[in-house]
Image (tube, helix red, strand yellow):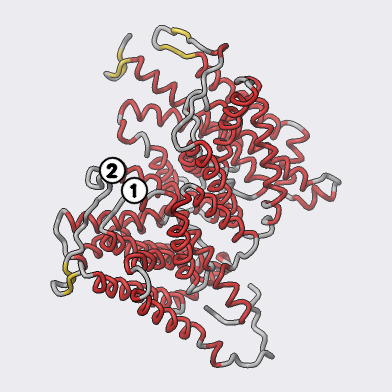
């Protein structure tokens, strides 16, 4: 053990790790928000609630079918993604011609409903979800102890983020998506079913949130309000990064997680607020956001 | 929107042009009679929330700016009002003024940051800044953390009126509410208010006409924050309590809900919405967490089915302004 700036290395790297973990969730969630906003022009306020639903779905799958973490990691995002598709078909598609603000209000209402239902059935206290057998234990890296599960979360979210970036920026499907974002009428004229693409995009964005929720379940307790406070921080992340760039959302998410972790070491009182303060500074210096284009 | 001026339409009848005045008389009369019929404390609380919703509506309804962080101004005004009355022994008029001034300062700072971005970003920025100030309230010593500031003395107004008397307190709150309401009415119908509406309809056009829209937006934001502060500061004296509930994000959501239910951009909508939501919360208190679900359902149905809100729909049916 050694010291850096008078801080024991284990504490420093420990917080750095927590920062990277939080950053993984910021990145996954702001990525989903950016993808949804790109196609639907709606800020999905229920994103946090859908993240929470992912965690609860994993919990329920374990309770009622005995299927553990790995199956849940696939099944829960699919189930929650399908509920997202239903939400889009039933509600959101009626709002595309209206002011963007109505989308925000509607999804805020949905978030209240989801959270309220969860609170009624599960109470406000957190429910435990154990780390899967195969990822228990950890590695001693000499300067710190790295639990296997946390390493997995960081790696998995990096892979998902970069994979999403690759699909959107480098494949034919992604090209359709980007084209439909720019000019949906023209893309429709080329014979591509844009409304279906919009529906599936929303489903995918929601599934991403649920995936993050399942990964979060063993780290944080599974609780109804786990999403609502997180989503506000993610909004700040999105304001800082700007929603124009997928890569920007990923970098900003991880970066801010790390900064938040370091703040916990050097100035713990500010760790809750540091991201908001950074947002204020970015607004002063670069109002369009770090990766945003001036509208 | 649908109100296209048609030169062939005959002059509006006396009733139609006077609808706002008639509405105001009915509202005032109802509020004067109400404390003899139902609980004064509930009515005072409802008037504070009604003023809060009117202040919020000034932004969303007349400038088209959705602030999702109005709890900041309401809550911090409430804290400073409660603290100055309890710890410094301020009389109620000074305590409310202190709270209001706090909200105004917060409004200047948050407003000048938030107006740097438009539309959806504006909503996210206001929400994030409010959350930041929530954490400050949570950590600061003077707010009492989870306990809040309790047993705030109501005091003696101007050294004359003892506010421990429920009816005196009621009269004071009624005067504050009506004054705030009329002030907002004057803003909306002033040349300044017309520019705000022009910004709401088409900001680019307003800029091309030579208006510095950012300044107008900032002034509107500060006015809205300040009036929300009046509501919060008064609430702290009435309920003798300031707590984290007042600054947290669900409070910001609640004021959006009140205004949406009553009718965005209507004069009386926020008042009706505030009373409706408070009555609902009061009646539904026994069913606990389901209130959250019902509020969410109201949000969804308002957005999908009646975007004009209760008062907006009535005004639209009768072709009057309310």
Q: Residues within 10 Å of mark 1 (few under 14, many from 20)?
A: many
Q: In front: A65, or A9?
A: A65
> Residue under circle 1?
B244
Left or right: A159 in relation to B100: right
Q: Residue at position x 63%, y 72% from top?
A: B1
Spatial CA span between label 1 and label 2: 7 Å
Circle 2 chain = B
Left or right: A84 in relation to B169: right
Q: Which mark is residue B296?
A: none
Q: Residue at position x 70%, y 40% from top?
A: A201
Looking at the picture, does residue B8 appear above or below residue A237?
below
> Residue under circle 2?
B145
Looking at the picture, does residue B83 appear above or below residue A228?
below
Q: In front: A156, or A191?
A: A156
Dots 1, 2 in contact, CB < 8 A: yes
Q: Position of residue B74 (x, y in %)?
A: 35, 58
Asked which quadrant contains residue A15, the reply is top left
Q: Position of residue B316 (x, y in %)?
A: 61, 76
Asked which quadrant contains residue B168, the reply is bottom left
Does the rendering let one see residue A30?
yes
Q: Position of residue B55 (x, y in %)?
A: 41, 66
Looking at the picture, does residue A241 appear above or below residue A73?
below
Q: In front: B208, or A77?
A: A77
Circle 1 chain = B
Q: Residue at position x 55%, y 46% from top?
A: A111
Left or right: A227 in relation to B105: right
For label 2, the SS is loop
Check the image and name the residue furthest to the right: A191
């Amino acid at each position: 053990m050694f010291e850096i700036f008078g801080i024991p290395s284990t504490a420093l790297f420990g917080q750095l790790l927590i920062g990277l973990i939080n950053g993984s969730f910021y990145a996954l969630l702001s990525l989903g928000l950016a993808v949804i906003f790109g196609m639907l022009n709606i800020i999905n306020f229920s994103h946090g609630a859908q993240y929470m639903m992912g965690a609860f779905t994993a919990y329920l799958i374990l309770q009622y079918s005995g299927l553990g973490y790995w199956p849940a990691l696939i099944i829960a995002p699919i189930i929650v993604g399908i509920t997202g598709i239903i939400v889009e078909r039933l509600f959101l598609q009626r709002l595309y011609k209206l002011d963007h603000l109505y989308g925000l209000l509607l999804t805020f209402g949905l978030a209240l409903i989801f959270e309220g239902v969860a609170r009624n059935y599960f109470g406000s206290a957190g429910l435990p979800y154990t780390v899967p057998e195969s990822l228990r234990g950890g590695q001693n890296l000499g300067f710190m102890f790295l639990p296997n599960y946390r390493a997995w979360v960081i790696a998995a979210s990096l892979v998902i983020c970069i994979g999403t970036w690759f699909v959107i920026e480098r494949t034919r499907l992604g090209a359709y998506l980007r084209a439909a974002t720019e000019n949906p009428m023209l893309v429709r004229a080329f014979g591509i079913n844009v409304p279906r693409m919009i529906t599936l995009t929303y489903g995918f964005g929601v599934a991403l949130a649920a995936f993050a929720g399942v990964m979060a379940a063993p780290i944080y307790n599974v609780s109804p309000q786990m999403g609502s406070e997180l989503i506000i921080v993610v909004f700040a992340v999105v304001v800082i990064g700007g929603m124009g760039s997928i890569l920007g959302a990923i970098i900003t998410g991880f970066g801010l997680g790390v900064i938040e972790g370091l703040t916990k070491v050097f100035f713990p009182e500010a760790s809750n607020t540091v991201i908001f303060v950074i947002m204020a500074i970015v607004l002063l210096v670069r109002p369009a956001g770090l990766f945003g284009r001036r509208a | 929107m649908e109100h296209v001026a048609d030169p062939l339409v005959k002059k509006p009848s006396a009733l139609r042009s006077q609808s706002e005045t008639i509405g105001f008389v009915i509202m005032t009369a109802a509020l004067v009679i109400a404390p003899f019929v139902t609980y004064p404390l509930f009515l005072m609380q409802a008037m504070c929330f009604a003023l809060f919703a009117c202040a919020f509506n000034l932004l969303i309804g007349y400038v088209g700016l959705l602030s999702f962080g109005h709890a900041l101004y309401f809550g911090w005004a409430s804290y400073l009002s409660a603290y100055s009355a309890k710890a410094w022994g301020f009389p109620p008029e000074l305590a409310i003024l202190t709270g209001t001034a706090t909200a105004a300062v917060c409004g200047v700072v948050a407003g000048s940051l938030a107006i740097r971005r438009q539309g959806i970003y504006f909503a996210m920025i206001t929400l994030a800044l409010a959350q930041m100030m929530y954490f400050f309230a949570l950590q600061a010593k003077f707010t009492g953390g989870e306990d809040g500031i309790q047993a705030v003395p109501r005091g003696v107004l101007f050294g004359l009126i003892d506010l421990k008397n429920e009816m005196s307190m009621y009269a004071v709150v009624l005067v504050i509410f009506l004054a705030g309401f009329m002030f907002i009415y004057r803003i909306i119908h002033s040349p300044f208010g017309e520019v705000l509406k022009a910004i709401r309809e088409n900001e680019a056009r307003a800029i091309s006409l030579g208006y510095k829209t950012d300044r107008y937006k900032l002034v509107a934001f500060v006015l809205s924050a300040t009036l929300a502060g009046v509501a919060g500061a008064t609430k702290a004296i009435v309920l003798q309590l300031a707590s984290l509930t007042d600054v947290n994000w669900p409070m910001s959501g609640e004021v959006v809900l009140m205004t949406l239910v009553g009718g965005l951009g209507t004069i009386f909508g926020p008042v009706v919405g505030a009373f409706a939501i408070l009555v609902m919360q009061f009646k539904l208190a026994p069913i606990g967490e389901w209130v959250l679900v019902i509020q969410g359902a109201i949000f969804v149905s308002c957005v999908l089915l009646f975007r004009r809100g209760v008062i907006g729909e009535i005004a639209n049916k009768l072709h009057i302004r309310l």
